[in-house]
Image (cartoon, rainbow, N blue to C red):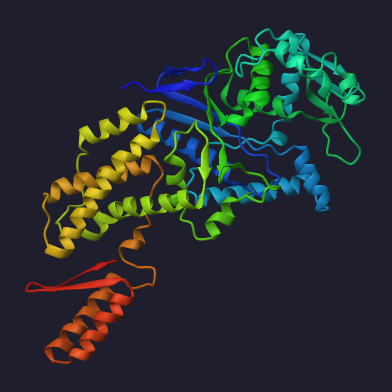
Amino acid sequence: MTLTLYNTLTRRQEPFETVEPGKVKMYYCGVTVYDYCHLGHARACIVWDVIRRYLQFIGYEVRYIQNFTDIDDKILNRACLEHSSMEAVADRFIKAYFEDMARLGIKEADEYPRATHTMNGIQRLIHELENKGFAYPADGDVYYAVRQFAEYGKLSGRRLEDMQAGKSDRVNIEDPEYQKKKDPFDFALWKAAKPGEPAWESPWGAGRPGWHIECSAMVRDRLGDTIDIHAGGADLIFPHHENEIAQSEAVTGKPLARYWLHNGMVKVDGEKMSKSLGNFTTIRDLLDRGVDPMAVRLFVLTAQYRTPIDFTDEAIAAATNGWHTIKEGLLFGYQYGKKLGWGVGTASLPAETVERFQETVNNDFNFPGGLTVLFELAKELRREGNIIVHEGKTETSPDELQRQWQTLVTLAGVLGLEAEIEAETQTINGLSDAEIEAKIQQRQEARKGKNFAESDRIRDELQAQGITLIDSRDGTRWHRN
């Protein structure tokens, strides 16, 4: 069962082979911290979180780095509007990022480098590019000479000749930055300081780095010259990732990454998400409306990670229903394990089921196919739970049910789908199992005393709180609706 990945660089699906056997070096281009994270960020972070989890599940040691872009015009503009500072704005939204990701069950990266904390590495890389003839200074700025890198465009498939044909009518020749460049395609590695903006001292004068050089430097500083997986949204392929390749590989002479993976974009009711259209939704707004974070994860995982995904009320409702099914299965052991006489040990997982899950997901991280295995397990456990409630017994041996349940828990954990265990002993309205049993005992005593009005009142009270009683010759059983 070989893991194969679609590599944006080669435009084909390839067997996954790491630089160092058994180890994965993975970098994800993170967020620019000037606002709260939105649905697009949610999808990307969930996708790369699950890919990291899966790689660990199949035995890889993963070093996962995610950056924060904390130098940017958007951050500066927000700081100006709020009469604040770039650092204060960045710190506030980095804090908000961690809050949102925790709610979605995203595991923290091994490290979160920030551009402002990588200034030495950034300047060192620019200096090396300059020495090798790939960069040139211009009145306090430094530009990358795109035509010096013969392989420019290999990631995006764009050719300079094709782009040149339509570029002339979009260029403002009066733009001071344009006039500094030797070629219209050249891009900034270092920008001279402007009045009132934060700046750092450098060999080219006070200024700040360009966006693209930041990631090249952070990858190199944290993971080395060549990494295994470079991940990000499809919108970053050009120019950001294309420029990263040009910067890094011009200096090292080595591939920046063996595999380039890109997640698809999120649409809202078929439209591109934007504030101007009024369909811009932040993660915290969505979760504060009562949408279960696990339903959001399930919604993201029901689509192949490279394809666009459409966020609609119907889609999130379907994901919520799907999560309820998986959640019932995940809670089966806590609800019925004691009654079935399960021990505290871990049962061996059925190899056939795990292999089917792995074989499916190994096909370019086919998580929708993996979910099919989870739903089969969850539905079978739900069926067995209903039999236990209504008949007081099961059709399947307790040992087999324990293996099925532990398989579901394990595979769901790979996808980051986890149920709150307190749901086993507490309903939304707060009634615990012990409280329900006490109510049933009160009802039994009322029936023995022929106080049928009180017996009916207790039954109706429990029914109103989502608990159904089933009377039989063997006594009274109950289940939550």
Residue drawn at x 14%, y 56% as measured from the top left: 341
Direction from residue 209 to residue 109 in the image, left or right:
left
Residue that appears at 24% across and 79% down: 438
Q: Residue at x 21, y 79 (%)?
A: 440
- x, y percent for residue 245: 64, 18
Q: Position of residue 379 (x, y in %)?
A: 25, 49
Above or below residue 336? Residue 179 is above
Could you tell whether 182 is left or right of 291 in the image? right
Vertical placement of 50 versus 142: above or below? below
- Tell me where residue 133 appears, x and y as whole percent: 77, 9
Q: Is residue 146 above or below residue 50?
A: above
Residue 382 in view = yes
Tally of numbered discs: 0
Residue placed most toward the observer, 184 or 19: 184
Q: In the rendered image, which quarter contains the N terminus?
A: top left
- Residue at 48% of width from left, 37% of height from top? 47
The C terminus - image quarter: bottom left
Q: In the rendered view, does 208 fall on the left or right side of 345?
A: right
Using the image, determine if residue 425 lies above or below residue 87.
Answer: below
Residue extending farthest to the left is 473
Residue 19: x percent and y percent?
Answer: 47, 17
**Is residue 216 among the parts visible in the rendering?**
no
